[in-house]
Image (cartoon, helix red, strand yellow):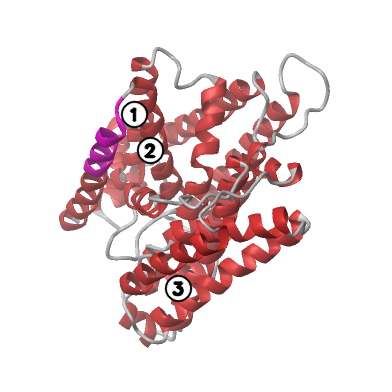
Amino acid sequence: MSTYQGQATTQGFGGVKAITGFFREHVRQYGMLIALIAITLFFQIVTHGTLLQPLNITNLILQNSYIVVMALGMLLVIVAGHIDLSVGSVAAFTGAVAAVMMVQYDLHPILAILACLLLGAAIGAVQGFWVAYMKIPAFIVTLAGMLVFRGLTLVFLQGQSIGPFPVSFQRISSGFIPDLGPAALHISTLVIGLLISVVLVYLDIRARNNQRKFNFAVSPFPLFILKNLAIVAAIMALCYLMASYKGLPNVLILLFVLIAFYTFVTDRTVIGRRIYALGGNEKAAKLSGVHTARLTFYAFVNMGVMAGLAGMIFAARLNAATPKAGNGFELDVIAACFIGGASASGGVGTVIGAVIGAFVMGVMNNGMSIVGIGVDWQQAIKGLVLLFAVFFDVYNKNKA
């Protein structure tokens, strides 16, 4: 326990000094959240309010849904101390396979989805085998995978787009949750927002009580209240905006379920803790009895499943599988994880951080497009943001 934590625990974390000290010690955790809020406010001003219009918020969620899905898988790979450059090509390939099965062979969408998830798992298993058991660097294996599956995508599609998909499949990405009844606002959206707010506040209170029970350091009480009020206000504001349009997109509900699941896995399960131990110090983890090769293998299998799911979400949004689908996805996904606080050396990173990183990239892309900044300058600016995020990580690590 640090000197600050010991003093703050004794004093009950009261006063301004305790709050500023807490922020100083948790700058890595809250830094990018503050940056996301600042970037959002900046583009809200320069776009004259267009950024946070209900229609644009919906587009922002749909445009970044597949990036968030892949970022959840990539986070575990990066935390384990590896990288995956093939995710964009794997997403394109699974989308192409889904199109062939549903459009050309009339396979039921549910069966096609299950088949593509299994295909993604198989691809991840093959790449994970070479990395985990053959000890070939992940950079080389996944670079080869990027080339292989990009080529196979062209083979499957024969250089042409395939579509349209069945309506039921399109609803994965373009559908909205049904409403409880006719009204000016989408009542179901408001009810879901209220339920999510209550659950999050309850979980935060329970976690704080458990920390106090075992004499762990907790955040200052004023900051705890302010944080929960801000969370509830943000959720209800978002739900109100969405309720004034068409409600919550189906894909947002899927994202919420995935985020909750991966947060639970990384924070509350043995396998999650072992992945962090693997990335922090592989030799120490192995000497402690952790099956490091097996964990690495599982991380790549999981990444394959997430890439497959993201590929189908992207294809459903376009309503077609295209040869150029997934181009550059791997860069946005990796950038999202690093911007969200994941360490390039492994062992550090959070699910919420990866999600925040994905939306930092998404808000920047969307805001710059609305303002009229060209794609060339967008790429340059995103590169600088990524460089600064990694520098911030290295600076804090050296300072500690």
Q: Is residue 276 above or below residue 26?
A: below
Which of the two discs, 3 and 2, labels the residue nearer the N terminus? 3
| Image location (x, y in percent) of residue 373 | 30, 26
Q: Is residue 352 left or right of residue 343?
A: right
Label 1 packing within 10 angstroms: few (<14), some (14-19), many (20+): some
Q: Give the distance between the C-alpha atoms of the residues marked 1 and 3, in whole angstroms.
A: 35 Å
Question: Can I make out residue 23 in this image?
Answer: yes
At label 3, the amino acid type is Arg
Q: Quadrant of the C terminus?
A: bottom left
Which stretch appears magenta?
373-385
Q: Quadrant of the N terminus?
A: bottom left
Q: Are marks 1 and 2 in contact (CB under 8 Å)?
A: yes
Residue under the point 41% across and 30% down: 366
Label 2 packing within 10 angstroms: few (<14), some (14-19), many (20+): many
Residue 375 in the magenta stretch? The answer is yes
| Image location (x, y in percent) of residue 225 | 48, 32
Find numbered disc 1 in the image and state the secondary structure of the residue it sits on: helix
Residue carrying label 1 = 39
Label 3 packing within 10 angstroms: few (<14), some (14-19), many (20+): many
- Mark 1 vs mark 3, foreground winner is 1
Q: Which mark is residue 274?
A: 3
Residue under the point 56% across and 48% down: 161
Find numbered disc 3 in the image and state the secondary structure of the residue it sits on: helix
Find numbered disc 2 in the image and state the secondary structure of the residue it sits on: helix
Residue 167 in which image quadrant? top right
Q: Which mark is residue 360?
A: 2
Q: Give the distance between the C-alpha atoms of the residues marked 3 and 2, in whole angstroms.
A: 29 Å
| Image location (x, y in percent) of residue 269 | 55, 67
Q: Give the distance between the C-alpha atoms of the residues marked 1 and 2, in whole angstroms.
A: 8 Å
